[in-house]
Amino acid sequence: MRPALRRVASALRGLRWYVRELTGESAYERHVTRLRERHPEAVPPSRREFERMRTDRQESDPRQGFRCC
Amino acid sequence: MRTAHVRTIAVWTLVALVGAAGWSVLALARGEEVSAAWMVAAALGSYAIAYRFYASFIARRVLRVDRTRATPAERLDNGIDFHPTDRRVLLGHHFAAIAGAGPLVGPVLAAQMGYLPGTVWIIAGVVFAGAVQDMVVLFFSTRRDGRSLGQLAREEIGPFGGAAALLAAFAIMIILLGVLALVVVNALASSPWGTFSLAMTIPIALLMGFYLRVLRPGRVTEVSLIGVALLLLALVGGRWVAESSWADTFTLAPSTLVVWLVGYGFIASILPVWTLLAPRDYLSTFMKIGTIVLLALGVVIALPTLRMDAVTDFATRGDGPVFAGSLFPFVFITIACGALSGFHALISSGTTPKMIQKETQIRLIGYGSMLMESSVAVMALVAASIIDPGLYFAMNAPSGVIGTTVQNASQVVGSWGYHISPAELAQAAKNVEESSLLSRTGGAPTLAVGVSEIFAKVTGGGLRAFWYHFAIMFEALFILTALDAGTRVGRFMLQDTLGNLYRPFRNVSWKPGLVLTSALVCGLWGYFLWVGVHEPLGGINQLFPVFGISNQLLAAVALAVCTTLLVKSGRLKWAWVTGIPLAWDATVTLTASWQKVFSADPKVGFFKQRQVFQDAIDAGQLLPPAKDMDDMRTVVTNSTVDGVLSAVLALLVVIVVLDALRVCIRHIRRPALSTLSEAPHVVSKITAPDGLIPTRAEKEAARHAAGTAAGG
């Protein structure tokens, strides 16, 4: 029984990872980790600031994230 | 020399046999019931073989993808637009970006020639042209730090060809938006259920936008789940509204819908991205992937029988009511997305090349996701071919041809050899709780009927009307997203061009310029939408061929850029890989343009049509389906505009192709004159599998890489 449960749990974890990556939900954590590694002295932005910056970038170049017919 | 394992040979022989069995049954069965299973077998068998052998050949021998070379995502990683993305995630991203309403609409319209021509073109087209184009553009753009198609054309062909390509892309975008909006109008006209549920997507998206901006920034999954739940609620609520006293408020005439749509497009495109565009995009992506998975399951579980003829008489006679013209060249331009789509080149040279981890994954992302889109087109063709052919023609012929009563429609459709009684026509509309299904042109309603038929087989007939409106909303939802996003891209092109004349335009956030260019773009596609809705000869009948031609012309531009790059990068011997699809695409599309401009058949040739109607006006006569002189004059104006447009587009593309040819010939004669702007080779430090499922060697390499990273 136990290995089966473990397999279900790992499948669910995989699904959660996939959905978070696909929707860009994990972008903030990735950004903060990166910043800590490369510029330890910098103050990481808050999630709110980061998400604003991300959507506003799309404003300046609408070809990012363009959808097809 | 690698030797193949016995088991590998056995597996691939089996795959080949499955595909061959599908093709033989489709090709040989006449006058008997054919199951959609054979179409699925032919498609999947062909895709598997093409992916395993042809795509692999292109990646290794033609493009010579380099495992050791760092991609722009690795070199320029900034954690935002450039960052190495897991191949499975990027496959989802890229597929969601390329798949839209296109592959669902084209195959449905092409079904008027029977299911066989469409199937052959969707599968052969994707294997030899569409997927190849997506993959090669992705490769060259990746080698150039994710340059866009327009930039590639300017840098590799020259300023003249580049400018023509840019102008063509802009015109094509306008026509695309006009025709997609027309599909929505035709699906929602006098349908309170559909109109209400689509209207509700606007407050839902606003709510989601507010949630993401203010309440819980970045929590996309939870807000999307809330959005989808509200959407389903709106869908259920739509039925309730349609039966209540509010029904009249949401029963809109086509011309009212035009005003609403153009107004919506304008306002949405000047609002900040976070209010409508971004949340609506999450919603439509969730719905898109969900519905496509459901549809695939539905087709496989229900395995419906194809009721349309394999090849109808319209294929040879060229007088079909859905669109005029014979099989060659019109099937190949009606089915654009799903077989070969120029628009994909804009995605393959946009976001995706900035996110790909390894060059070796180009086969999976470029070729693989196009095969997935093609399978969506096959499903749309299945959905259109399983409904009663009589109903299909009654739904897709313009009202000028079949009239507005079920009696008249039944009689006209009967004269084409498809029998459906007036009672059956009325019952079909009643089944999906619509007032009428006659002349519901544009493909979306037909697809929705097919989808409701398939889903009702699995869930029971009681939910048929729900599934119909579910499918309508699902298509309308992402067409609305496309209107917003497309208006922004068109505006961006316009701002860039006008910036050369008056500097402030170049600043994309300069408000007066923004409003002016947005209004201009909306006005342009709004014009085509208005024309399409008021066209006495049927808007889809007249405009869809122009849309198909323009999309395939964009593909010709993309393939010309690819071929030039193959020649210039020392791959002359392999130039046929994109050269043959280019020759085919140019032949088909320019033949279609030629016929649309010069054909002596007034049903096909725009100028002949103009002449016939103008002569009648001069003689003071009325020609059906025109009801008065105003209609006559509308036909004359519209056919002039459509004719001039077809000619100009074809001319622009001929310029691009000739300019590309000139560059190729110059390179062959004097290679020293060519410049190639490839980014330099930097050694890649990333270890990642090439395909979807890692091989044993790749797993070993990943373990090894993890070991050295931990140790050092």
Image (cartoon, rainbow, N blue to C red):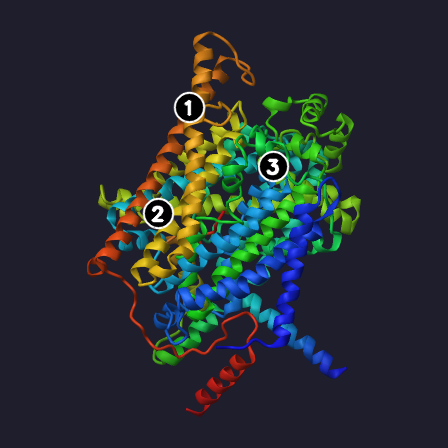
**What residue would you read off at disc 1?**
B607
Tags 1 and 3 on a common chain: yes
Image point 67% across, 45% down: which residue? B383
Disc 3 target residue: B113
For badge 3, the amino acid type reads Met
- The quadrant in which residue B286 appears is bottom right
In the rendered structure, which amino acid carries the disc numbered 2? Phe
Q: Which of marks 1 and 3 is in front?
A: 3
In the picture provided, is B63 more to the left or to the right than B220?
left
**Residue at mark 1 to residue at mark 3: CA–CA distance:** 25 Å
Q: Are marks 1 and 2 on the same chain?
A: yes
- Say which of B663 and B480 sits in front: B663
Q: Which of marks 1 and 2 is nearer the N terminus?
A: 2
Q: Can residue B266 be seen in this view?
A: no
Query: Badge 2 is on which residue?
Result: B492
Please indicate whether residue B11 sits to the left or right of residue B667 in the image: right
- Other-residue count near label 3 (Cα within 10 Å), few / some / many at <14 / 14–19 / ≥20: many
For image coordinates 61% across by 71% down, the residue present is B9
Regarding residue B32, the answer to whether it shows in the image is yes
Q: Residue at x 49, y 24 (%)?
A: B601
Please state if B81 lies on the left or on the right of A16 as rendered: left
Residue B243: x %, y % from top left: 73, 35
